[in-house]
Image (cartoon, rainbow, N blue to C red):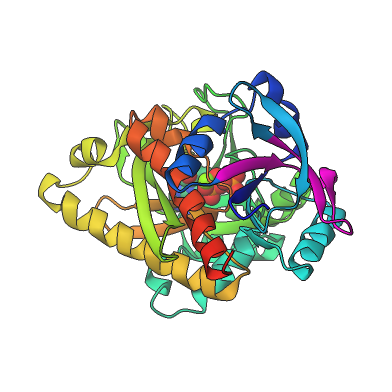
Amino acid sequence: MGQNHVGILLNSSMYRGIPRRKTGQESLSNYEEAARRYGLIPCFLRLGDMDLRQNKCIAYVWNGRDYAKTVMPIPSVIHNRALYSEQIAFRKLAALSARGKIVFNTNNRYGKDVIHRILWNDPDLRPYLPETVTASAGSLQTMMRGYSDLILKPVRGSVGRGIMRLRDAGGVWEVLYSSSKKAAFPQPSTRLKREDAAAWFRRQRLPVPYLIQERIPLAEVERRPVDLRVTVQRGLRGTWTVTGLFAKAAPPGSFVSNIARGGGAYPATELLPSVLPAHLVPAIINHVEALALAVARRLSSSLPLLGDLGMDIGITSKGHPYFIECNGRDQRYGFRKAGMEKTWKETYIQPVAFAGYLLEQRGL
Ligand SMILES: Nc1ncnc2c1ncn2[C@@H]1O[C@H](COP(=O)(O)OP(=O)(O)OP(=O)(O)O)[C@@H](O)[C@H]1O
Ligand SMILES: [Mg+2]
């Protein structure tokens, strides 16, 4: 029993919403549809409901009318869609693997510093990485000597929050903050002399570790910086492919494009011709896709089993792509927001197909 079950691991808050179909941006029906294609059954789980010793779990399984709590063996293959920060969760995930369960995207929240280090070690990828250092009073001064535009951001998951931009406005530096609200206009700003930057940095008493990054001069539409979300996944054959990409534009007055911070989502083929030389767009998209694949393969060879990555890739007005960051739990709904319903569904189909591939590999 259980050969055709695929576990979808969710955080408790989302899991609790299942009976009321309140699962935020995660579409359970997309998983159902995807699983039907491959003769699989999705089982929605959370870590707290797994009894490893007895190989039992309580999962929500669709019974044709409702999601019913079902006691069943822990599925052999599990797609992790949860984000964890507690050590106890990581220990339980490790214990699952130790018992032979395959959990892909086991860790969805690597630090941006960890990802940068892995990619930097690949000389072919270096031309695509903004210079990045651990934030400190000293490193800020050094970066301010080398660049005229900088981004300061938390090492871990901020969804556009807590990000700062420091820009040389002709002798004096301007500090811009990413707004905590969706409407980012107008933004508060502070002015700062370079020699005062170290003291300013210490006064911030940043509550979490930060990175300082060269700011990429992103192509803009009506002065709104644009970047791309590229979804790279493994599917039925286990190989990495680009499932799709869409363009994001920061809201007016902002420098972060996150949809959660009011960024707009558009099909790349519609938006890019208005921000880049139109005849170059197809080649630029190819370049971006090749970069995204190279990044996925590199990360995949250095980190425990990965199958699903959402990357932010920026493009300069000259068309050079830069890797900005990579998310393990991709926010797939951006495709829907961009009107790309088919690709949105495809972002669910690929990981389910990959789960099928893993089951087959194991001879299950
Ligand atoms: N080096 C950079 N150059 C230009 N723009 C940047 C840079 N870093 C970040 N940005 C802008 O800020 C946005 C948010 O930054 P980033 O994607 O790195 O973090 P995040 O989305 O907040 O993190 P997470 O997804 O982990 O919550 C990017 O999509 C981009 O628009
Ligand atoms: Mg991002």
Residue 60 x, y percent position in the rendering: 70, 34
Quick check: 219 above or below 283? above
Q: Is residue 56 magenta?
A: yes
Quick check: 93 above or below 19? below
Task: Using residue 266 as the reference point, say whether residue 34 is left or right of it.
Answer: right
Residue 121 x, y percent position in the rendering: 52, 79
Task: Using residue 105 as the reference point, say whether residue 253 is left or right of it.
Answer: left
Residue at image point 35% right, 41% down: 246
Quick check: 356 above or below 218? below
The span shown in magenta is: 41-60
Residue at image point 82% right, 64% down: 95
Which is more toward the observer, 39 or 279?
Answer: 39
Please tell me in which quadrant of the rendered image residue 49 appears. top right
How many numbered discs? 0
Magenta stretch mostly in which secondary structure? strand
Residue 255 x, y percent position in the rendering: 46, 38
Task: Using residue 212 as the reference point, say whether residue 263 is left or right of it.
Answer: left
Q: Quadrant of the C terminus?
A: bottom right
Q: Is residue 236 visible?
A: yes
